[in-house]
Amino acid sequence: RAGEETTDAETLETWYLALSNAVSGELPHDLLGVWLYPASGGAELIAPAALAADQLAVPTPPGISTQQLQLLEEIIRDAGYPSAMAVVIRSGDQPTGLLLFAALRGELYDERVRAMGEGIAAHLAPMFGRLARRWGLPDAGPAESMNPSAAALSAVATAISAADTAH
């Protein structure tokens, strides 16, 4: 909304930091990249903002393949992160976001950790589904708009829950 850009950016940054901290105990990472796939198409980098300078091309819907995700992981490994894992956030059958975990320590992301990442993505899916549908649209009014702070706190709480129960 007009005049709230700073608040929205601050909310997203706070949400991102809370998410990163919440999952770091179970899913260690030195970098967590988060993208949204708006319903209108393309990919929007949510955080970290510094990643935009790298102009990293991420796979976009409709056809995100395992090979594309593996290529993205390889690019990240070539950039100096020996461990890399890309996980698609899906709302139903629709990709609505992407999580990219990377670590400076090698061989961290085995199948158990990948399952944990997929669990986190599943818990974030409802919020990303709403964001994907609303991204770039004018505010529909208080009755139809989601409260970003409440959604962010809810998503972080469910991610924490997922990390604690994914053992």
Image (cartoon, rainbow, N blue to C red):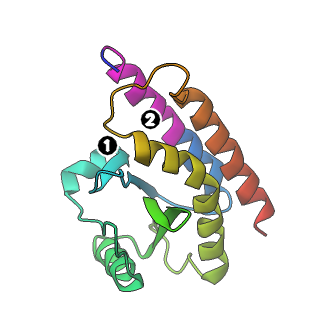
Quarter of the image holding residue 79?
bottom left
Q: Residue at x 29, y 45 (%)?
A: 50
Magenta stretch, residue numbers: 3-16
Residue 18: percent from the left, percent from the top?
Answer: 58, 40
Specify the quadrant of the image occupied by residue 69: bottom left
Q: Quadrant of the C terminus?
A: bottom right
Mark 1 is surrounded, within 10 Å at the Cα level, by few (under 14), some (14 to 19) or many (20 or more) other residues, namely few
| Image marks 2 and 1: residues in contact by CB distance under 8 Å | yes
Q: Residue at x 62, y 61 (%)?
A: 122
Between discs 2 and 1, the one toward the N terminus = 2
Can residue 99 be seen here?
A: no
What is the secondary structure assignment of the residue under circle 2?
helix
Three-letter amino acid code at the position of disc 1: Ala
Between 142 and 69, the one nearer to me in the picture = 142
Label 2 to label 1: alpha-carbon separation? 9 Å
Question: Hey, what amino acid is under mark 2?
Answer: Glu
Q: Which residue is mark 2?
A: 13
Which quadrant is the N terminus positioned in? top left
The label shown at residue 49 is 1
Tell me: 6 left or right of 161: left
Left-right relation of 13 to 15? left
Q: Secondary structure at mark 1?
A: helix
In depth, the one of 158 and 13 nearer the eye is 158
Q: Is residue 103 above or below residue 125?
A: below
